[in-house]
Amino acid sequence: MTADGLRTRYWEIGEGPPVILLHGIGAHAGFWRASIPALSDTYRVIVPDLCGSGRSEVPREVSRAVFVGWLAGFIDAVGASPASLVASSMGGAIALAAALDHREKVQTLILVDPVGLGRSVGYAFRVASIPIVGELVVPSDAKGIRRQLLRLSYDDDWLSDDLTAETEELARDREHRRFFFKSLRWGVSCIRGMRPSTLLADELRNLSIPVLVVWGRHDGVFPVKLAKVAAERIRGADLVVMDRCGHMPHLERPEEFNAHVRRFLQSALTPSGTPPSPN
């Protein structure tokens, strides 16, 4: 389908209140495979490739307005307004910005190690942001992708061959690879860390919807101290810090992660005084 003028691939399964899962930079819809079955028995689960990622069309520019415009258009196109957004890393920043800029379209937020809460960012992303150097060090082969993904995590027993193979296939697309580096350099500076264009911490007090923040205690991309920034500035936010987790709790410890998400959604989406669903 088309969202804000951009062809967008998405998966959809289940019935109920709409829940949209948003992946991070360099990823694709397949990064949510471990959460889809756990949520789709109760919710209408919708999983797009972000614009410029996976099999979705690449926009001409990189900006907050482009990403938020695409997400707002996608929510409208699939008839999911207002939606609950479960969003990881860069997807978290896009979801957060959408909740601030289009409040009528976002009902609840679950932010998973999101971009946007501070300048701190891991060394590997800083190096990858350097022109020419990044193209040399960021792999597009299966072995290199596997090594890179495992660096983002705490343990190494979660990564499937299927996910590695799909990520390799999509990483070989030249147009999408160019957009990956364009997006990375829009957001990250080798010297100063996250650029001001990505920072949303000063706007967090404007949120007035239920928010859950989930963070891996051992995240090497964004330190867990940033989780406390969100918890302190978002009114009423819930915070879960998951042990033995790096940057991708939804992949590394899916059963625990999915339980937290289900518990939060059930509480946030159940009207006061209504008995919770047996699911």
Image (spheres, helix red, strand yellow):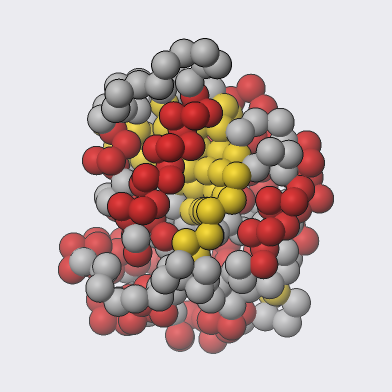
* Outermost residue, top side: 273
- Residue 111 visible? The answer is yes
Residue that appears at 34% across and 76% down: 155
Q: Is 243 placed above or below 70 here?
A: below
| Residue 198 image-quadrant placement | bottom right
Q: Where does residue 62 sit, x and y in percent of width and height?
A: 62, 53
- Residue 70 visible? The answer is no
Q: Where does residue 124 sit, x and y in percent of width and height?
A: 53, 81
Q: Is 73 placed above or below 24 here?
A: above
Q: Is 49 placed above or below 114 here?
A: above
Residue that appears at 65% across and 31% down: 209
| Residue 176 image-quadrant placement | bottom left
Q: Where does residue 43 sit, x and y in percent of width and height?
A: 34, 28
User: Quadrant location of the N terminus?
Assistant: top left
Of residue 254 and residue 11, the one placed in the foreground of this image is 254
Of residue 155 and residue 15, the one placed in the foreground of this image is 155
Q: Where does residue 94 sit, x and y in percent of width and height?
A: 59, 46
| Residue 27 image-quadrant placement | bottom left
User: Quadrant location of the C terminus?
Assistant: top left
Total residue callouts: 0
Q: Is residue 152 left or right of residue 66?
A: left
Residue that appears at 43% across and 37% down: 263
Q: Is 195 placed above or below 250 here?
A: below
Of residue 46 and residue 67, the one placed in the foreground of this image is 46
* Outermost residue, left side: 161
Residue that appears at 67% across and 47% down: 64
Q: Is residue 213 left or right of residue 150?
A: right
